[in-house]
Image (cartoon, grey):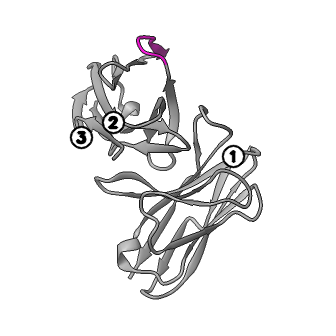
């Protein structure tokens, strides 16, 4: 059975800290891995990763895929209160996305 | 620039009632999806469609039906609502394999 596991489930940090979120997967017909940020409403797209070892960056956020270890990490440096959200990892297999349960991040001022 | 629009945003039903949730997308996307999100469970796929006139079951399809009569619309129906269907429902669309899904703002549904 396909599954995606995220860790930690929740995390509380202070502004300025660096955090690393983890996503591991067992999915047949792997196509890509995506990260989403969910605040109050719809998940919003952050990154899509298809190739191992190539880092994607957007401002203070970065992510990398390790196909050998079947995992990915999402790093956030110099965290801000606006980074507080649920971060979702999804793996695309065939036509479907398989989502992890998410990591709830809270950044304290 | 609407993207993916879900209606209604909130609804309260009594057990046994029926209702339909509507998802509309204006991006000419082929693929559309219905998910439910429950605390601690992440997003779980209910049904999906890979094109107009097609539907398929996802991970948790029981108690739901769907239809995709027009490319831009994907309807999710509850024939006889149960309290276990209390959840937040998200619709998403995708232009093609290997592209990100775009989500609507969700429908919060409570079944009493």
- Spatial CA span between label 1 and label 3: 30 Å
Labels 1 and 3 in the same subunit: no
Question: Viewer-nearest of labels 3 and 2?
Answer: 2
> Pointer 3: what residue?
A9
Q: Which residue is mark 1?
A: B3
Q: What is the spatial separation of the Cα atoms under label 3 and label 2, in whole angstroms? A: 18 Å
A57 falls in the magenta region: yes
Q: Residue at x 42, y 57 (%)?
A: B59
Residue A15 visible at all:
no
Q: Where residue A78 sits in the image (x, y, percent)?
A: 33, 17
Secondary-structure class at tag 2: strand
Instruction: Identify the magenta region.
Output: A51-58
Question: Would residue A87 be visible to someone looking at this image?
Answer: yes
Secondary structure type for disc 3: loop
Residue B96 has which mark?
none
User: Which chain hosts label 1?
Assistant: B
Q: Position of residue A103 (x, y in %)?
A: 30, 38
Label placed on residue A26:
2
Say if mark 1 contacts mark 3, CB within 8 Å. Answer: no
């Amino acid at each position: 059975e396909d599954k995606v596991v995220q860790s930690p489930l929740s995390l509380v940090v202070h502004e300025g800290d660096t955090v690393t979120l983890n996503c591991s997967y067992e999915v047949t017909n792997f196509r890509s891995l995506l990260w989403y940020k969910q605040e109050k409403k719809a998940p919003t797209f952050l990154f899509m990763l298809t190739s191992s070892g190539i880092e994607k960056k957007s401002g203070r956020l970065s992510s990398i895929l390790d196909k050998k270890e079947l995992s990915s990490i999402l790093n956030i440096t110099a965290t801000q209160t606006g980074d507080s959200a649920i971060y979702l990892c999804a793996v695309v297999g065939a036509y479907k996305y398989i989502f992890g349960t998410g990591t709830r991040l809270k950044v304290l001022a | 620039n609407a993207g993916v629009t879900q209606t209604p945003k909130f609804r309260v039903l009594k057990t046994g009632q029926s209702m339909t949730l509507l998802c509309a997308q204006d991006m000419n996307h082929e693929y559309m999806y219905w998910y439910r999100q429950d605390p601690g469970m992440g997003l779980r796929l209910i049904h999906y469609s890979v094109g107009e006139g097609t539907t398929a079951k996802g991970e948790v399809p029981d108690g739901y039906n769907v239809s995709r009569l027009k490319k831009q619309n994907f309807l999710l129906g509850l024939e006889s609502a149960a309290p276990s269907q209390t959840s937040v429902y998200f619709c998403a669309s995708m232009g093609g394999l290997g592209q990100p899904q775009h989500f609507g703002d969700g429908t919060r549904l409570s079944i009493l």
